[in-house]
Protein backbone atom coordinates (compact mmCIF):
# COMPACT_ATOMS: atom_id res chain seq x y z
CA UNK A 1 0.00 0.00 0.00
CA UNK A 2 1.25 3.50 -0.76
CA UNK A 3 -0.06 6.94 0.07
CA UNK A 4 0.40 9.47 -2.71
CA UNK A 5 1.56 12.91 -1.74
CA UNK A 6 -1.11 15.49 -2.45
CA UNK A 7 -1.06 19.24 -2.29
CA UNK A 8 -4.44 20.09 -0.80
CA UNK A 9 -5.37 22.55 1.92
CA UNK A 10 -8.72 20.97 2.77
CA UNK A 11 -8.51 17.97 5.13
CA UNK A 12 -11.63 16.33 3.73
CA UNK A 13 -10.21 16.33 0.22
CA UNK A 14 -7.01 14.71 1.49
CA UNK A 15 -8.99 11.97 3.20
CA UNK A 16 -11.23 11.44 0.17
CA UNK A 17 -8.24 10.96 -2.11
CA UNK A 18 -6.38 8.74 0.34
CA UNK A 19 -9.50 6.66 1.01
CA UNK A 20 -9.96 5.99 -2.70
CA UNK A 21 -6.42 4.60 -2.86
CA UNK A 22 -7.07 2.30 0.08
CA UNK A 23 -10.59 0.98 -0.45
CA UNK A 24 -11.89 2.42 -3.72
CA UNK A 25 -14.08 4.95 -1.97
CA UNK A 26 -16.17 2.47 0.02
CA UNK A 27 -15.71 4.60 3.14
CA UNK A 28 -15.04 1.62 5.42
CA UNK A 29 -14.26 3.20 8.80
CA UNK A 30 -11.33 1.00 9.80
CA UNK A 31 -9.39 1.74 6.64
CA UNK A 32 -10.20 5.41 6.88
CA UNK A 33 -8.75 5.50 10.38
CA UNK A 34 -5.57 3.79 9.22
CA UNK A 35 -5.18 6.40 6.51
CA UNK A 36 -5.75 9.24 8.96
CA UNK A 37 -2.94 7.85 11.14
CA UNK A 38 -0.58 7.57 8.18
CA UNK A 39 -1.31 11.16 7.24
CA UNK A 40 -0.68 12.24 10.84
CA UNK A 41 2.71 10.52 10.75
CA UNK A 42 3.43 12.57 7.62
CA UNK A 43 2.61 15.68 9.73
CA UNK A 44 -0.37 16.50 7.51
CA UNK A 45 -2.53 18.92 9.55
CA UNK A 46 -5.95 17.54 10.44
CA UNK A 47 -7.70 20.77 11.30
CA UNK A 48 -11.17 20.40 9.81
CA UNK A 49 -11.76 16.70 9.50
CA UNK A 50 -13.78 15.11 12.34
CA UNK A 51 -12.52 11.82 13.80
CA UNK A 52 -11.95 10.02 17.11
CA UNK A 53 -8.22 9.79 17.86
CA UNK A 54 -8.67 6.75 20.12
CA UNK A 55 -10.25 4.74 17.30
CA UNK A 56 -7.63 5.94 14.83
CA UNK A 57 -4.85 4.70 17.13
CA UNK A 58 -6.68 1.42 17.85
CA UNK A 59 -7.23 0.48 14.20
CA UNK A 60 -3.75 1.54 13.19
CA UNK A 61 -2.14 -0.53 15.96
CA UNK A 62 -4.13 -3.61 14.91
CA UNK A 63 -3.22 -3.06 11.27
CA UNK A 64 0.48 -2.87 12.15
CA UNK A 65 0.23 -6.06 14.20
CA UNK A 66 -1.52 -7.92 11.37
CA UNK A 67 1.24 -6.89 9.00
CA UNK A 68 3.99 -7.75 11.52
CA UNK A 69 5.37 -4.26 11.18
CA UNK A 70 7.43 -2.62 13.89
CA UNK A 71 7.11 0.94 15.11
CA UNK A 72 9.06 3.50 13.09
CA UNK A 73 11.34 6.04 14.74
CA UNK A 74 8.89 8.79 13.79
CA UNK A 75 6.05 6.92 15.48
CA UNK A 76 8.15 6.34 18.60
CA UNK A 77 8.90 10.05 18.80
CA UNK A 78 5.26 11.02 18.23
CA UNK A 79 4.13 8.58 20.92
CA UNK A 80 6.48 10.09 23.48
CA UNK A 81 5.55 13.46 24.93
CA UNK A 82 9.13 14.29 25.88
CA UNK A 83 12.75 13.31 25.36
CA UNK A 84 15.91 13.78 27.40
CA UNK A 85 18.70 15.90 25.97
CA UNK A 86 22.00 14.03 25.96
CA UNK A 87 23.75 17.31 25.21
CA UNK A 88 22.47 19.18 28.28
CA UNK A 89 23.33 17.46 31.54
CA UNK A 90 24.28 18.39 35.07
CA UNK A 91 25.74 16.54 38.04
CA UNK A 92 23.59 16.81 41.14
CA UNK A 93 24.14 14.92 44.38
CA UNK A 94 26.23 12.35 42.55
CA UNK A 95 23.59 11.84 39.85
CA UNK A 96 23.72 12.79 36.19
CA UNK A 97 20.54 14.63 35.28
CA UNK A 98 19.35 15.45 31.78
CA UNK A 99 17.27 18.35 30.59
CA UNK A 100 13.74 17.53 29.40
CA UNK A 101 12.52 18.70 26.01
CA UNK A 102 8.81 18.31 25.30
CA UNK A 103 7.45 17.56 21.86
CA UNK A 104 6.23 21.13 21.47
CA UNK A 105 9.87 22.21 21.56
CA UNK A 106 9.76 23.69 25.07
CA UNK A 107 12.38 22.65 27.59
CA UNK A 108 11.45 21.42 31.05
CA UNK A 109 13.23 20.47 34.24
CA UNK A 110 15.71 17.69 34.93
CA UNK A 111 15.43 13.89 35.16
CA UNK A 112 17.88 11.10 35.82
CA UNK A 113 15.97 8.66 33.58
CA UNK A 114 12.75 8.12 31.65
CA UNK A 115 11.50 6.07 34.62
CA UNK A 116 11.16 9.28 36.65
CA UNK A 117 8.39 10.87 34.54
CA UNK A 118 5.55 9.05 32.80
CA UNK A 119 5.01 9.53 29.06
CA UNK A 120 1.26 9.25 29.73
CA UNK A 121 -1.11 11.78 31.21
CA UNK A 122 -0.39 15.49 31.54
CA UNK A 123 2.33 15.22 34.19
CA UNK A 124 5.27 17.58 33.71
CA UNK A 125 8.53 18.57 35.36
CA UNK A 126 9.21 22.21 34.56
CA UNK A 127 11.62 25.09 35.21
CA UNK A 128 14.62 23.95 37.28
CA UNK A 129 12.76 21.19 39.14
CA UNK A 130 14.52 17.83 39.46
CA UNK A 131 13.35 14.23 39.76
CA UNK A 132 15.87 11.43 40.23
CA UNK A 133 16.77 8.15 41.96
CA UNK A 134 13.74 5.85 41.90
CA UNK A 135 11.22 8.67 42.27
CA UNK A 136 8.18 8.58 40.01
CA UNK A 137 5.91 11.34 38.77
CA UNK A 138 2.74 10.42 36.85
CA UNK A 139 -0.92 11.28 36.34
CA UNK A 140 -1.50 15.03 35.91
CA UNK A 141 1.17 16.15 38.35
CA UNK A 142 3.15 19.37 37.99
CA UNK A 143 6.60 19.64 39.57
CA UNK A 144 8.11 23.05 38.97
CA UNK A 145 10.15 25.96 40.30
CA UNK A 146 13.15 24.56 42.18
CA UNK A 147 11.31 21.58 43.68
CA UNK A 148 13.09 18.23 44.03
CA UNK A 149 11.57 14.73 44.14
CA UNK A 150 13.96 11.86 44.81
CA UNK A 151 14.58 8.62 46.68
CA UNK A 152 11.60 6.27 46.34
CA UNK A 153 9.03 9.07 46.47
CA UNK A 154 5.93 9.10 44.28
CA UNK A 155 3.78 12.03 43.18
CA UNK A 156 0.62 11.28 41.21
CA UNK A 157 -3.00 12.18 40.36
CA UNK A 158 -3.37 16.00 40.38
CA UNK A 159 -0.77 16.89 42.99
CA UNK A 160 1.64 19.82 42.67
CA UNK A 161 5.14 20.19 44.09
CA UNK A 162 6.76 23.58 43.58
CA UNK A 163 8.83 26.39 45.05
CA UNK A 164 11.78 24.94 46.97
CA UNK A 165 9.82 21.93 48.25
CA UNK A 166 11.46 18.53 48.73
CA UNK A 167 9.71 15.14 48.54
CA UNK A 168 11.91 12.14 49.22
CA UNK A 169 12.36 8.89 51.11
CA UNK A 170 9.26 6.73 50.66
CA UNK A 171 6.89 9.69 50.79
CA UNK A 172 3.81 9.82 48.58
CA UNK A 173 1.93 12.94 47.48
CA UNK A 174 -1.34 12.47 45.58
CA UNK A 175 -4.91 13.66 45.11
CA UNK A 176 -5.11 17.45 44.82
CA UNK A 177 -2.41 18.02 47.42
CA UNK A 178 0.10 20.86 47.08
CA UNK A 179 3.58 20.90 48.59
CA UNK A 180 5.38 24.19 48.17
CA UNK A 181 7.66 26.94 49.49
CA UNK A 182 10.26 25.22 51.71
CA UNK A 183 8.20 22.19 52.73
CA UNK A 184 9.95 18.85 53.20
CA UNK A 185 7.97 15.61 52.93
CA UNK A 186 9.97 12.47 53.68
CA UNK A 187 10.16 9.01 55.33
CA UNK A 188 6.77 7.29 54.91
CA UNK A 189 4.69 10.48 54.94
CA UNK A 190 1.45 10.60 52.95
CA UNK A 191 0.02 13.90 51.72
CA UNK A 192 -3.28 13.70 49.87
CA UNK A 193 -6.79 15.10 49.43
CA UNK A 194 -6.76 18.91 49.28
CA UNK A 195 -3.88 19.28 51.74
CA UNK A 196 -1.54 22.23 51.31
CA UNK A 197 1.85 21.93 52.99
CA UNK A 198 4.38 24.73 53.07
Image: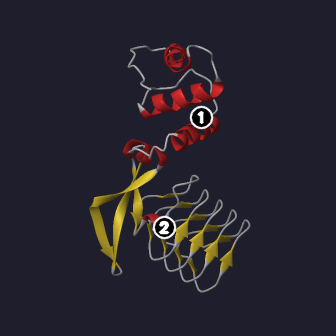
Could you say where residue 140 lies in the image, as x and y percent from the top left?
61, 56
Identify the residue at the far left of this view: 87
Q: Secondary structure at mark 1?
A: helix
Reply above or below: 129 against 40.
Answer: below
Measuring from the top left, give residue 141's x and y in whole percent.
58, 60
Which comes sooner in the sequence, label 1 or label 2?
Answer: 1
Where residue 36 appears, x then y in whole percent? 53, 28
On-image quarter of the N terminus: top left
Residue 103 visible at all: no
Q: Secondary structure at mark 2?
A: helix
For disc 1, the neighbor class at 10 Å (few under 14, some 14 to 19, many from 20) is many
Q: Nearer the viewer, residue 72 or 188?
A: 72
Q: Which mark is residue 116?
A: 2
Q: Is residue 55 visible?
A: yes
Q: Looking at the image, which residue is at 43% across and 48% down? A: 76
Residue 26: name its quadrant: top right
| Spot occupied by residue 92 in the image (x, y as percentages of width and height) | 34, 76
Eye-nearest disc, 1 or 2: 1
Amino acid sequence: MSIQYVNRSNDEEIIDIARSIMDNGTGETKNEHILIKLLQIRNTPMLNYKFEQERVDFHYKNWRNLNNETETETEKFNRKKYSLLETETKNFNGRTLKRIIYNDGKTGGWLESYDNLSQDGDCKVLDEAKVYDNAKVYGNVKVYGYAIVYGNAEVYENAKVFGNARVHGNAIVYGNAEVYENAKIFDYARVHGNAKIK
